[in-house]
Image: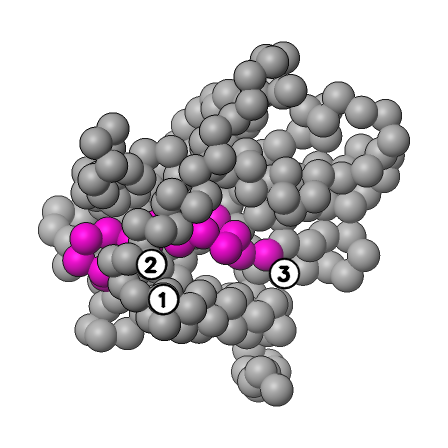
Amino acid sequence: MWQVHLVMVMLRRGINLFLVFFLIACENKNETHDITNEVKKVSINLVGQQNYTHIVSIMNDSIKHWKLNNLRKYIEVEGTSEYIADSLLCFNNNKTRFITCLIGKVLLKPNPTAGITFFYGEKINNLWYFFSGNHIFIPHEMKNIKDGNPFDFKELHQISLKEVYNGYLKSNGEINEEWFISHFENVGWCSTCKTTEDFQKSRLEDVKTLWLQRDTTQPIKQLP
């Protein structure tokens, strides 16, 4: 069994701090503990099954809309790259934030690669907005195989349990609010922001910028 470890490299461009993550592997005979059901149960008990399902639905519709309009960072090339939102959402106690991830693969043989992108939801002014964060690059060599097959989404989900969701619950099973603050309020979003409201304004500006970076000579396409 292969166990993954996270290595972080920080790159500074101007005043913005970018984080690039790489995974390296070492052989380990112990299975990774699957916390999927435990974490999902906490989130569903908190927000309710119907609300959980609704938020997953509008999140996936938003991603489909971005793909349809070829927004930067969300472009998917048929036969070359493919990604989906993971099914596990971790909500904070106020039910205004969640953390999940996008799991994806690049299908170029003989060395297909994969990656995990932190993905965030935040309720601002009673509306849900979604944002992508840092990316974890997963080299093909981690599979230790020679058949050229890429990671499947189940394997990527298993990696994300440790690399994305591990900080959600404290050792006593309570939700770790500091984990959310560290993800939503840091210099990676905004180097000058001080308050929660400052960070929210910064992210909303990012949403506007994302749509302006598309091909503006074409009208915005709507989902069928």
Q: Which image quadrant is residue 106 in?
A: top right
Q: Which image quadrant is residue 172 in?
A: top left
Examine the rendering and report whether any part of residue 77 can be seen: yes
Secondary structure under the numbered disc 3 in the rendered image: loop
Whole-percent x and y of residue 170?
Answer: 24, 33
Separation of residues labelled 2 and 3 (CA atoms): 31 Å
- The kind of residue tagged 2 is Ile
Question: Left or right: 187 with respect to 147?
Answer: left
Q: Is residue 179 above or below residue 54?
A: above
Q: Quadrant of the C terminus?
A: bottom right
Secondary structure under the numbered disc 1 in the rendered image: helix
Whole-percent x and y of residue 40?
Answer: 39, 51
Q: Which residue is mark 3?
A: 75
- Residue 189 in the magenta stretch? The answer is no
Separation of residues labelled 3 and 1 (CA atoms): 31 Å
Which mark lies nearer to you, 3 or 1?
1
Q: Quadrant of the N terminus?
A: top right
Question: Left or right: 15 with respect to 136?
Answer: left
Q: Is residue 192 above or below residue 57?
A: above
- Specify start and end residues of the magenta stretch as a single range: 84-101
Q: Which residue is mark 2?
A: 44
- The kind of residue tagged 3 is Ile
Q: Which residue is mark 1?
A: 49
Front residue (pair 113, 216): 113
Examine the rendering and report whether any part of residue 202 can be seen: no
- The kind of residue tagged 1 is Gln
- Residue 90 in the magenta stretch? The answer is yes
